Image (cartoon, rainbow, N blue to C red):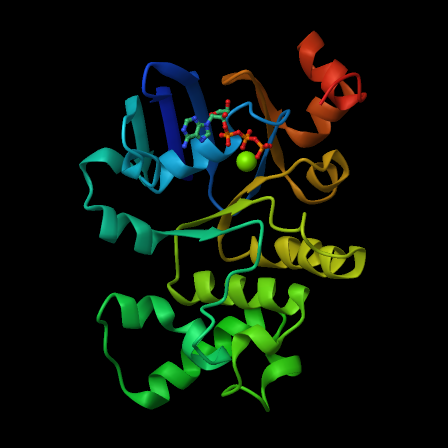
């Protein structure tokens, strides 16, 4: 479909002979937040690590099936090119400790050897920090180390770093689970704002968070995609008994 950013078709992933993901199908449309939910160990992190081709870096890991980004086969792309188009934000904020706030935002350009005039780079830094709702807090201290910031600010810095590359999609792996409620609320507000310009896939354990910020939700159980659809629909009338049990806290 024209508006499709990510397609996952019949996708499976293994660690050695242990099959972790079973025949997953998933489609993510442009400019939405899609949430991935499911109990611990069900394969959420594995799935998003397959999307940016990190999974295959683990010895013995393998995949089968198909994934496409904007109709281009992810497994036929060069990983370096792919990872420029697929941003990633982790559970624990991980700004580069030796770099300033400014350098962190444009780290992707430096790592990829992309050069540009300082004025252009200044523009990207400001724009990315504004989009990540961090500019006002750091505009006078851009040359201090990123690690001086609070946890929530560090996470917004990591979001700015991902945004700076102008990715097609950003993968978030439980991005607020290490943050306090106020920082979490700020980041949740940010998601709603950001989807005007970027597509997001959000792994979350927090059912309330999925309900608040996502347009679509996938429920994964034991490596199988049980249900995927509009969040409101899934939360009000889940199709599958397992989804219903998960949403009502019977396990998880
Ligand atoms: N490096 C690895 N080698 C072998 N097995 C692994 C490895 N990493 C994860 N696994 C296994 O793969 C399965 C899925 O793990 P994964 O981290 O994808 O789950 P998850 O849904 O993200 O869980 P959580 O909610 O706890 O983060 C688990 O059974 C886990 O033990
Ligand atoms: Mg995980």
Please state, as top left, top right, bottom left or bottom right, where the N terminus lies in the image: top left
Near-viewer residue (144 or 172): 144
Q: State the residue at coordinates (30%, 70%).
A: 109
Q: Quadrant of ligand 2?
A: top right
> In the image, 123: left or right of 174?
left
Q: State the residue at coordinates (20%, 42%).
A: 77
Instruction: Mark yes or no: residue 237 visible.
Output: yes
Position of residue 143 relative to residue 11, above or below, is: below
User: Residue 221, located in which quarter of the rendered image?
Assistant: top right
> In the image, 134: left or right of 94?
right
Near-viewer residue (177 or 59): 59
User: Residue 7, located in which quarter of the rendered image?
Assistant: top left
Position of residue 104 relative to residue 122, above or below, is: above
Query: Horizontal and vertical percent for residue 172?
Result: 53, 47
Query: Horizontal and vertical percent for residue 216?
Result: 60, 33
Q: State the residue at coordinates (41%, 78%).
A: 103
Please state, as top left, top right, bottom left or bottom right, where the C terminus lies in the image: top right
Near-viewer residue (112 or 40): 40
Query: Horizontal and vertical percent for residue 165?
Result: 37, 64
Position of residue 103 relative to residue 224, above or below, is: below
> In the image, 114: left or right of 206?
left
Residue farthest toward the top in the current orientation of the protein: 241
Q: State the residue at coordinates (72%, 42%).
A: 209
Position of residue 60 relative to residue 201, above or below, is: above
Query: Horizontal and vertical percent for residue 155?
Result: 59, 62
């Amino acid at each position: 479909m024209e508006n499709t950013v990510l397609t996952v078709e019949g996708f499976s992933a293994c660690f050695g002979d242990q099959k972790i993901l079973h025949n997953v199908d998933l489609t993510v449309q442009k400019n939405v937040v899609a949430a991935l939910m499911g109990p611990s160990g069900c394969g959420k992190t594995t799935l998003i690590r397959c999307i940016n081709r990190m999974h295959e870096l683990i010895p013995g890991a393998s995949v089968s099936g198909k994934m496409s980004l904007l109709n281009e086969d992810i497994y036929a792309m060069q990983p370096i090119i792919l990872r420029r188009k697929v941003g990633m934000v982790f559970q624990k904020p991980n700004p580069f400790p030796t770099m300033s706030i400014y350098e962190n935002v444009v780290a992707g350009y430096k790592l990829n050897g992309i050069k540009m005039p300082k004025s252009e780079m200044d523009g990207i830094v400001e724009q990315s920090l504004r989009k990540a709702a961090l500019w006002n807090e750091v505009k006078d201290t851009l040359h201090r180390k990123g690690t001086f910031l609070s946890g929530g600010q560090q996470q917004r810095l990591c979001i700015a770093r991902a945004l700076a590359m102008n990715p097609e999609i950003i993968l978030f792996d439980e991005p607020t689970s290490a943050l306090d409620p106020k920082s979490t609320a700020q980041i949740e507000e940010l998601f709603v704002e950001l989807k005007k310009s970027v597509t997001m896939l959000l792994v979350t354990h927090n059912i309330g968070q999925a309900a608040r910020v996502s347009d679509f939700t996938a429920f994964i159980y034991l490596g199988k995609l049980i249900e995927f659809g509009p969040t409101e629909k899934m939360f009000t009338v889940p199709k599958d008994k397992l989804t219903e049990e998960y949403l009502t806290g019977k396990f998880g």
